[in-house]
Image: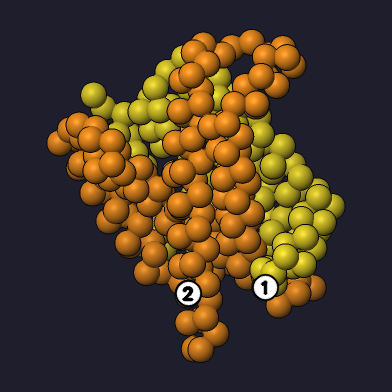
Chain colours: A yellow, B orange
Amino acid sequence: MKWLLVALIIACNTVGDVLNTHGMKRHGEVQDFGLHGIRRLIAALVRNRYVVGGIAAGAVSFVALLMLLSIANLSFAVPATAASYLLETVLAKFILKEQITWKRWAGASLVAGGVALLALH
Amino acid sequence: MRDSKRLRSKTFLFACVAILSNVLGNFALSQGMHQFGRFLSVSVLSFLSVLSNLWIASGICLLAVWMLSQLSLLSWADLSYVLPVTAASYVLTAVLGAVALGEDVSIAHWIGIGMIFIGVMIVGRTAPRTAALEPGEPQ
């Protein structure tokens, strides 16, 4: 049950982040952070189908995380998602066409390795 | 040149907001869920009673702030930049746990925290944006 929830969290996180990034790049750089600007941003986001899809995937991942937190500790739940760092970097390269230099790979690998180490007891 | 400096400061500010709201939001949720014990039911009523808990409610508000700052970051920065940089939240969680809550942190955990910190520093020094602009995208 634990690992099924972990798999669901990783899959939904990854799909959600890729959809959100694509949707936000289509939206363009957010520049107005006044109350008005934030309201306009939210109005634009609910009409952006990539972001809506990304947030839906995030919501599934969130509910799965709540369930996981009720049967496992935070120290199991959070580090178990380390794999998503590498998976998302690969998808950022091939789907989002980002230039992943060796610095980005090194950073993502260190982060994933570090997060995995946090799971050790 | 000036534009890239502006983008860096803006990215730094939003990364800080995203990291802080994420750490505090997860902490509040964890506190709330431990008051409830096992939660594997999917009935609407039990879900609503969880939402009425003050810890859970403030956790959700903080995660809404996190969501908006993360989405704003992604509107100008790469996913492969934002993701490793906001992993600084693990470092902050561990340091807060050790300093504020007096939790024991093992050697393996400190090594993991150190690795994440170095990873954040390496990616943080790259340009936030490398992906080409989409045709017709507002600048």
Q: Identity of the amino acid at label 1?
A: Gln
Judge from the rendering whether residue A118 lies leftward or rightward of residue A60; answer left or right.
Answer: left
Query: Residue A93's x, y, as percent?
Result: 54, 55
Asked if residue B134 shows in the view, the reply is no
Q: Secondary structure at mark 1?
A: loop
Q: Chain of mark 2?
A: B
Q: Nearer the viewer, residue B59 or A68?
A: B59
Identify the mark at residue A19; answer none if there is no mark: none
Q: Nearer the viewer, residue B38 or B120?
A: B38
Query: Residue A70's x, y, as percent?
Result: 49, 17
Identify the residue at image location x=41%, y=69%: B126
Q: Identity of the amino acid at label 2?
A: Arg
Q: Nearer the viewer, residue A63 or A100?
A: A63
Cα separation, mark 2 vs mark 1, equals 14 Å
Q: Residue furthest left?
A: B107
Judge from the rendering whether residue A60 lies leftward or rightward of residue B79; answer left or right.
Answer: right
Q: Dot 1 corresponds to which residue?
A: A31
Identify the residue at image location x=75%, y=49%: A50
Instruction: Relative to A22, say whether B76 is above or below.
Output: below
Q: Dot 2 corresponds to which residue?
A: B8
Instruction: Relative to B139, say whether A109 is above or below.
Output: above
Which quarter of the rendering shows the C terminus of chain B? bottom right
Identify the residue at image location x=66%, y=34%: A59
Q: Mark 2 near mark 1, Cβ–Cβ under 8 Å?
A: no
Q: Nearer the viewer, residue A71 or B81?
A: A71
Q: Secondary structure at mark 2?
A: helix
